[in-house]
Amino acid sequence: MRIEDLDLRQAVLHNLRGATSEELREMITDAITTREEKALPGLGVLFELLWTHSSPQEQQHMLSTLEAQVNPPNA
């Protein structure tokens, strides 16, 4: 399988295959810290995995957290 034959989602998952939880944490932290836009698709794919494998209660918790962050009380 050639990486150039994959769509973006498949390419991200291919590149992360075999990653440990610590490696995933480092990747997420680095992407957030450096604020490089090229990391956004990878974070999106990770969020998609998180969302699709979360219970409705976990999804609601994520939504509440996101809503609080995009609508700060003193905005």
Image: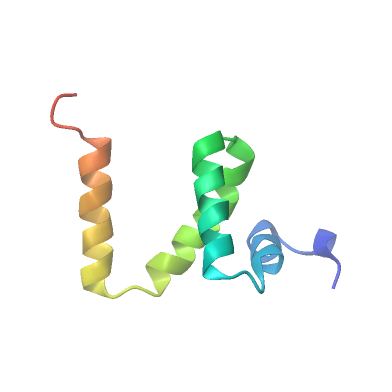
Q: Position of residue 21 (x, y in %)?
A: 52, 68
Which quadrant does the C terminus fall into?
top left
Residue furthest to the top in view is 75
x and y percentages locating residue 37 in the rendered image: 59, 36
Residue at the outermost left position: 73
| Nearer-the-camera pick, 7 or 70 | 70
Q: Which colour scheme is used?
A: rainbow
Taking 69 as reference, is 49 above or below it?
below
Left or right: residue 30 versus residue 49 is: right
Q: What residue do we see at 21% from left, 35% from top?
A: 71
**Looking at the image, residue 34 lies above or below residue 49:** above
Which residue is pictured at 56% across the width and 45% down the height?
30
For residue 19, above or below residue 64: below
Given residues 52 and 72, the one toward you in this image is: 72
Q: Residue at x 26, y 68 (%)?
A: 58
Coordinates of residue 56 in the picture (x, y in percent): 24, 72
Position of the N terminus, as image quadrant, is bottom right
Q: Position of residue 72 (x, y in %)?
A: 19, 33
